[in-house]
Image (cartoon, rainbow, N blue to C red):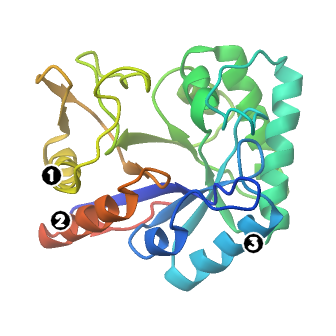
Amino acid sequence: MAAIDLNADLGETVDGAPTADDEAMFAVISSASVACGGHAGDAASMRDCVKRAARHGVAVGAHPSYPDPAGFGRLPMTMAPDELAASVAVQLGALVAAGADVRYVKPHGALYHAVTSDRAQADAVARAIVDQSELLGRPLPVLGLDGAISAAAASVGLPFVREAFLDRGYTSAGGLVPRTAPGALLHDPEEVAARAVRLVREGVVVAVDGTLVAVDGASLCLHGDSPAAVAMARAVRSALDADGIEVRAPW
C-alpha cells in the first residue's frame, strides 16, 4: 500500500488568539509542525497542541522561525549564525518543555526559504537541531526542500525528509511561487485533493504556467492558517483514503 505523511503548520497563536482551527486539522493529519515562539505560539498553545496530538495520534514536529512575531516569521532577517542557532535552540527547548515528544524539525517562513540557499544559516539551524537531538538521545529529522539545509543535515548526521506543498503554487523550475505573486496560494479543496493523489502516484504537480513539474515529497504540507484549510485538509484526506493511500507519519 502506498503511504504518505500529511503535515500542517499549527499552534500558530498570535497574542493568545489562534490563527487556525487546530482541532479540526489535527483530526485528519499525521504530523503537526508546531509553532514554538519565534513567529507565533506560546506555552499555552504548545501545551494544547501536545494534548491534541496525543488524542489524535499525530506526530509533533517543531516549527522554529526567525524571532519575528510582528512579521509572522515571513520577513527575511540578517542574523549571525551563533545568534540564529541560539534562537532556534530556545524554540526547540520551549516545545520540549511543553511536554512534546518532538519527532522532527521544520523551519518556518523566511527561515525555511533562507536555509535552502544560505549554507551558513542552514548550518546554524542544523547545529541547534543536533544539540537538541543529543539531549533527546536520538537524531531529529529535518523536514524541508532540497538545498543547503539537506546538505547541512547530511554533514552532521541528521536525516532529511523532502516536503511537497499542496496549497502553494509551483514555478516551472520546481520552486514555490513567491507569496506576493499571482498563483502563490491554492484554495480549491478539489484541486488540492487531486494534487495530493497525483503527487503520491505520479510525483508531479501542475505549475502555474500549466507545465508538469517533478516533485519528490515524502510529506505533504497544508498551511493551517489558510481560509479554506479545514475544507482542503478534509478533501485531501478523503481523496487519499479513497485511493488506497495510507496517511501515516514517517518519524
For numbered disc 1, what is the local secondary structure?
helix
Q: Position of residue 53 (x, y in %)?
A: 58, 75
- Which of the pair 3/9 is nearer the observer? 9
Label 3–label 1 contact, CB within 8 A: no
Residue neighbourhood size for the residue with mark 1, other residues' Cα within 10 Å, grouped as few (<14), some (14–19), many (≥20): some
Q: CA distance from mark 3 to mark 1?
A: 34 Å
Determine which residue is flagged by label 3.
47
Query: Which label was assigned to residue 239?
Result: 2
Q: Mark 3 or mark 1: which comes first in sequence?
A: 3
Q: Is residue 112 left or right of residue 165?
A: right
Q: CA distance from mark 3 to mark 2?
A: 31 Å
- Which of the pair 159/18 is nearer the observer? 18
- Give the residue type at disc 2: Ala
- Which of the pair 130/82 is nearer the observer? 82
Q: CA distance from mark 2 to mark 1?
A: 7 Å
Determine which residue is flagged by label 1.
194
Assign the N terminus to one quadrant of the image.
bottom left
Residue at coordinates 28% horizontally, 20% vertically from top-left? 171
Label 2–label 1 contact, CB within 8 A: yes
